[in-house]
Image (cartoon, rainbow, N blue to C red):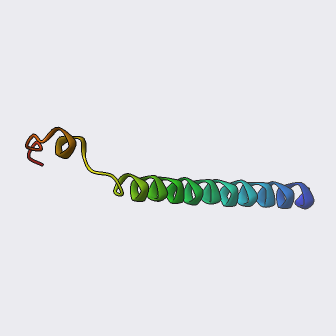
Amino acid sequence: MPSVLGSMMVASTSAAASLQEALENAGRLIDRQLQEDRMYPDLSELLMVSAPSE
């Protein structure tokens, strides 16, 4: 029985590690998209209207 429990713990640790990696990759992708978006003017600037207050 201990080998079954040990393999379950390894599987859950592996799943947690893959979830962590997926979250980090998603964060990097969002950061890259935001950085690319900042390279272009806002729509309000292109239309020459005042931006809504934040």
Q: For residue 52, what is the image quadrant?
A: top left
Indicate left or right for 23 with 45 as reference: right
**Quadrant into which the N terminus falls:** bottom right
Residue 22 lies, in percent from the top left, at 62, 54
Count of marks overlaid on the render: 0
Q: For residue 38, what is the image quadrant?
A: bottom left
Q: Residue at x 83, y 57 (%)?
A: 5
Q: Residue at x 66, y 57 (%)?
A: 16
Q: Nearer the viewer, residue 21 or 10?
A: 21
Indicate left or right for 36 with 18 as reference: left
Indicate left or right for 51 with 18 as reference: left
Residue 19 lies, in percent from the top left, at 64, 53
Q: Residue at x 69, y 56 (%)?
A: 18
Q: Residue at x 89, y 61 (%)?
A: 2
Q: Nearer the viewer, residue 34 or 50?
A: 50
Residue 9 lies, in percent from the top left, at 77, 59
Residue 48 lies, in percent from the top left, at 12, 42
Q: Nearer the viewer, residue 54 or 35?
A: 35
Indicate left or right for 34 with 17 as reference: left
